[in-house]
Image (cartoon, rainbow, N blue to C red):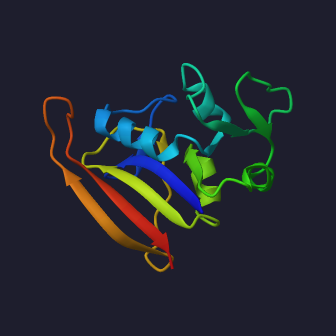
Amino acid sequence: MITIIAAAGSNNELGKDNDLVWHLPKDFKRFKKLTTGHHIIMGRKTFQSFPKPLPNRVHIVITRNTDYHPEGAIIVHSMTEALEISKNDSQIFIIGGGEIYQLGMKIADKIELTRVNSSFDADTFFPEIPSEDWKLISEEFHLKDEKHKFDFSYQTFVSN
């Protein structure tokens, strides 16, 4: 199973200057719960946005840079290589950024999307989810509160 996991604003905003433009503690906990113990595939900029590698996950970084060799990650140069390394994991996650999500849309079985119900100034965007290719199977709403500045919902899509 290959799952794209992302959080995007109302207009598919992902972030700006290699950082998220919101802070949702419940979403961080959900991300950790879903991805712990699995391979996570990402681009170089996404990996570099972490203060350190995320615990208990295998980090696979896709980059064009052949001189990039950070500690705590397996470096590959294509999605095909990333999937080959991950092939024994029953649940692979694609965690970003924008270009990597675009590649993932062609191969993923599921999308776990946190839809942040607001518009943001952003420079990176999540791809459109074509309704002919994807079906929304569940949605769980969360209202803003003292720890969450925005309403948001967890949406699960499966490929048709």
Is residue 24 visible in this depiction of the protein? no
Asked whether 34 or 83 is in front, the reply is: 34
Is residue 144 visible in this depiction of the protein? yes
Asked if residue 148 is positioned above or below residue 133 in the image, the reply reads: above
Q: Residue furthest right?
A: 66
Asked if residue 138 is positioned above or below residue 35 in the image, the reply reads: below
Asked whether 71 or 117 is in front, the reply is: 71
| Image coords of residue 77 (percent x, y) | 81, 44
Asked whether 112 or 89 is in front, the reply is: 89
| Image coords of residue 155 (percent x, y) | 34, 60
Image position of 138 (left or right of 89): left
Quadrant assignment, res 119: top left
Residue at figure coordinates x 43%, y 42% from the top left: 33
Image position of 52 (left or right of 130): right
| Image coords of residue 115 (percent x, y) | 32, 52
| Image coords of residue 132 (percent x, y) | 47, 80
